[in-house]
Amino acid sequence: MKIPKRIQPLVDDGLVDEVQSQLMSGKEASVYIVRCGETIRCAKVYKEISQRSFKKATAYREGRKVRNSRRARAMEKGSGFGREQQEKVWQSAEVDALYKLAAAGVRVPQPFGCFDGVLLMELVTDDDGYVAPRLNDVVMPAEQAIADHQVMMTYVVKMLCVGLIHGDLSEFNVLVDEYGPVIIDLPQAVDAAANNNAEWMLARDINNIRDYYAQFAPELANTEYAKEIWSIYEKGELKPDTKLTGEFIEQEDLADINAIMEEIDAARIEEKHRRERAKEMKDGIDESKFNWSES
């Protein structure tokens, strides 16, 4: 096929030898199947910000740090240079996340570098060598659904342990090969510690996955992994091998005994002062009566 304009520089530099076909076109990027020497890979071409339809990008960028102070100031002001820098941060976020998650034991496509808005990475295939299907296109028995769901919860935990939340995880962002689920599409990965939206994004990710697998294993619909995982994470006790139960008991807000005692003490002191003031006023009135009668 005709070489896309954005991939041409990679062909010129010998990083890509042939563009075989377009794999998909999404809200933030188009993906092509390419040949690099004897290896078939995929090239993800990020769309320009004017063409990208990904909504609420600001919520995802929150907490992303830029070391260069000039770049950071420009991004805050929203200047032309700042928007360009935002794009670079947005694009590099995915390749950074891929390297970090692969090192943490999460199955993601192997990245080979990002070049001027084009991410070269592994093409995930099935056991016949065809492009692996999305989870959305896979039907499975209940036992497999339960097993794969457990794998996905393990991946979510490992991601959180290295400070990341996918932020847009669903059956459309998971591929399935002969070894199981592979997580894809990470440009919107969220910094769990710095993003104020982290908790609900994590819950949405987990519940999306739960709801899909629950179609095949209905018992999963009643699990509460999102609340369980976040509760353990907030306590600082979450580890990659943390054993999960999928259960979470909502506790009513426990009374703050210290605060109540302080309020009682304050009320007691106030009442004591009130009585003292009343006594002083009474004594003053009695004394004035006494003085008046003597006169």
Image: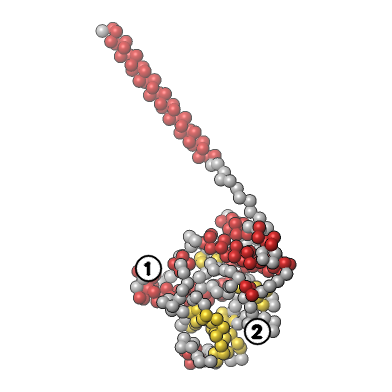
Question: Can you give x and y, in whole percent of width and height, for residue 53 in the image?
Answer: 46, 74
Question: Can you give x and y, in whole percent of width and height, for residue 263 in the image?
Answer: 48, 36
Question: Can you give x and y, in whole percent of width and height, for residue 266 in the image?
Answer: 45, 33
User: What residue sits 67% from the left and 85% below the top?
Assistant: 129
Instruction: Indicate whether 141 appears above or below 23.
Output: above
User: What residue sits 57% from the left and 44% below the top?
Assistant: 254
Question: Can you give x and y, in whole percent of width and height, for residue 113 in the image?
Answer: 53, 81
Q: Nearer the viewer, residue 189 or 25?
A: 25
Q: Which callout, 2 or 1, points to the residue nearer the camera?
A: 2
User: What residue sits 55% from the left and 81% below the top?
Assistant: 24
Instruction: Indicate whether 283 appears above or below 202.
Output: above
Q: In this orientation, does residue 236 appear?
A: no
User: What residue sits 35% from the left and 20% below the top?
Assistant: 281
Instruction: Indicate whether 205 appears above or below 272.
Output: below
Quadrant location of residue 287? top left
Badge 1 marks a residue whose secondary structure is: helix
In this figure, which residue is indicated by the disc labeled 2? 130
Q: Residues within 10 Å of mark 1 (few under 14, many from 20)?
A: few
Q: Is residue 268 left or right of residue 239?
A: left
For residue 44, which numbered disc appears in the image?
A: none
